[in-house]
């Protein structure tokens, strides 16, 4: 038996170490531009530097911070770098990080209203605020038949939407007896991969997902959707779910939500609007048209963890009819029964998503909204779109490059006119340089470069430097 009776970190030590950690993070923010944006380590390199065995006895805190610098940082791809233009952003901010810390400090588990009333009520409240901020319909408001909830990711939100759609279409028989082969779901060929994942998990099977053609702007062809639904109906199948995407991951295309919604309504198909990335734009009145037709949706999701300065994870999921969602997901064992739940006047968020337990995520969103105000959020979103338009102008004016898709908001898809091999060489060269990080997609037959502008601290000088580096890489590639 050891002699100590307490191995914990006492509050005084926590206070001291906590300050060091906050200092470490602030230093990281200050020096972030000095790191190569994309980590260049080889597979296994980080693990090789970690001890094979966990420590038998506790180690000093300094040792952990030292390893953070020496072992972990080289294996970090710096998502918060202003020179990060890859994928979609997963941006963050000071208030978000502090909100996350407070959430960890309170460490409540908000599965039911009773398990921390403030965790549930702040979430309801902030989600109602966000409806107004994004110009979303009243039917998603907590005072209506609908409501909103924070999910970890858009993938989970889409899965929950599909599960509710499946139950609505089968009168809740599938929840009891499992899925038959008749249910069909729809999305465009550009819909996010999470739609296919959801279709598999929900038991429909990926063969039951119809990928609908897009138009020359990469937006869903609504008439092709209607033909698809009619063909399936004629075959005796049951269309139950369609996803419309506001800001496709590949090119930022915006599906015609209103037209899709009208078709969905006619055929009693659940419409889910996946606005994971681009929904945030609606905070600016001039971009609110991205939400045209959303009042026809049965559900909707947007990720503040992409473009609203709220660190991962934070997805907002809204439904027009919460009773269907809750009935789909609710299982109430004896050990979770309590008076508040029985009274029916509270929301128990455990019935609104897949896991039972849940973190206090509303806190970080609340801090972000209160720090920036609507005005501050608008300012930065607007600025990102302006920078994307500026970059678009440079591409259009350069005779070696061309745009590969329209630029509705903050993603520029472009390519060198010299063909796929050159574009691949350009991207490898700029990413290897560490100066910036870009990713690619395929549009039609072409390998296309994607430049997404949404990092919290990205300014014109970063976008200008990115363009200079891309052109320099193109010149080098051409001269080889
Ligand atoms: C990023 C993205 C997703 C997936 O987001 P997660 O929150 O990581 O699951 C889904 N749909 C679209 C349109 C996206 O851009």
Image (spheres, helix red, strand yellow):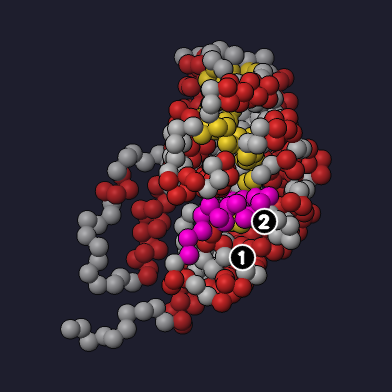
The percent coordinates of residue 423 (x first, y second) are 52, 20
Q: Is residue 318 magenta?
A: yes
- Disc 2 + disc 1, Cβ < 8 Å: yes
Residue 232's quadrant in the figure?
top right
Residue 458 seen in render? no
Tell me the residue at 73%/26% (across/down): 393
Q: Is residue 177 magenta?
A: no
Q: Confirm or reject: label 1 Cβ below 8 Å from ligand 1.
A: no
With respect to residue 236, does 37 lie above or below? below
Crowding near pointer 1: few (<14 within 10 Å), some, many (20+)?
A: many
Crowding near pointer 2: few (<14 within 10 Å), some, many (20+)?
A: many
Q: Earlier in the sequence, mark 2 or mark 1?
A: 2
| Residue for badge 2 | 147
Tell me the residue at 24%/57% (across/down): 51
Answer with left or right where residue 385 lies relative to residue 337: right
Residue 53 seen in render? yes
Answer with left or right where residue 67 lies relative to residue 304: left
With respect to residue 83, does 351 lie above or below? below
| SS label for mark 1 | loop
With respect to residue 97, does 45 lie above or below? above
Answer with left or right where residue 215 lies relative to residue 438: right
Q: Nearer the viewer, residue 285 or 109?
A: 109
| Residue for badge 1 | 347
Residue 142's quadrant in the figure?
bottom right
Tell me the residue at 67%/18% (across/down): 216
Q: Please give the range of residues in magenta.
A: 311-332
């Amino acid at each position: 038996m050891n002699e100590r009776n307490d191995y914990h970190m006492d509050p005084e030590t926590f206070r001291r170490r906590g300050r060091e950690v906050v200092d470490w993070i602030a230093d990281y923010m200050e020096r972030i531009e000095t790191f190569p944006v994309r980590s260049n380590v080889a597979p296994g390199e980080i693990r090789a530097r970690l001890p094979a065995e966990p420590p038998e006895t506790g180690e000093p805190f300094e040792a952990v911070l030292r390893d953070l610098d020496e072992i972990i940082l080289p294996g970090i791809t710096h998502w918060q770098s202003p020179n990060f233009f890859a994928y979609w952003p997963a941006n963050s901010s000071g208030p978000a990080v502090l909100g996350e810390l407070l959430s960890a400090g309170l460490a409540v588990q908000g599965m039911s209203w009773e398990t921390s009333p403030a965790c549930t009520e702040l979430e309801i409240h902030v989600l109602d605020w966000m409806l107004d901020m994004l110009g979303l319909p009243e039917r998603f408001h907590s005072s209506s038949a609908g409501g909103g909830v924070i999910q970890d990711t858009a993938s989970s939100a889409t899965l929950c939407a599909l599960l509710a759609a499946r139950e609505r279409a089968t009168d809740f028989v599938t929840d009891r007896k499992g899925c038959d082969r008749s249910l069909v779901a729809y999305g465009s060929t550009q819909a996010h991969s999470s739609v296919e994942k959801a279709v598999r998990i929900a038991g429909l099977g990926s063969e039951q997902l119809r990928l609908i053609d897009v138009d020359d702007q990469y937006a869903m062809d609504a008439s092709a959707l209607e033909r698809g639904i009619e063909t399936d109906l004629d075959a005796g199948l049951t269309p139950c779910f369609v996803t419309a995407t506001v800001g496709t991951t590949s090119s930022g295309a915006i599906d015609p939500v209103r037209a899709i919604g009208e078709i969905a309504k006619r055929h009693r198909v659940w419409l889910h609007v996946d606005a994971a990335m681009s929904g945030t734009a609606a905070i600016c009145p001039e971009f609110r048209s991205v939400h045209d037709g959303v009042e026809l949706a049965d559900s909707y999701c947007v990720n503040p963890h992409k473009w609203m300065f709220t660190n991962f994870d934070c997805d907002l999921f809204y439904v027009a009819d919460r009773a269907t969602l809750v009935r789909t997901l609710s299982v109430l064992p004896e050990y979770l029964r309590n008076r508040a739940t029985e009274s029916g006047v509270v929301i128990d968020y455990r019935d609104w998503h897949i896991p039972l337990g849940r973190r206090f995520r509303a806190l970080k969103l609340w801090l972000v909204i209160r720090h920036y105000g609507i005005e501050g959020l608008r300012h930065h979103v607007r600025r990102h779109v302006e920078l994307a338009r500026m970059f678009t102008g440079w591409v259009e004016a350069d005779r070696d490059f061309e745009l590969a898709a329209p630029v509705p908001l903050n993603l520029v898809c472009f390519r060198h006119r010299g063909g796929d091999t050159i574009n691949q060489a350009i991207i490898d060269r700029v990413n290897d340089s560490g100066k910036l990080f870009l990713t690619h997609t395929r549009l039609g037959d072409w390998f296309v470069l994607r430049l997404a502008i949404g990092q919290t601290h990205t300014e014109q000088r970063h976008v200008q430097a990115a363009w200079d580096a891309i052109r320099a890489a193109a010149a080098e590639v051409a001269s080889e």
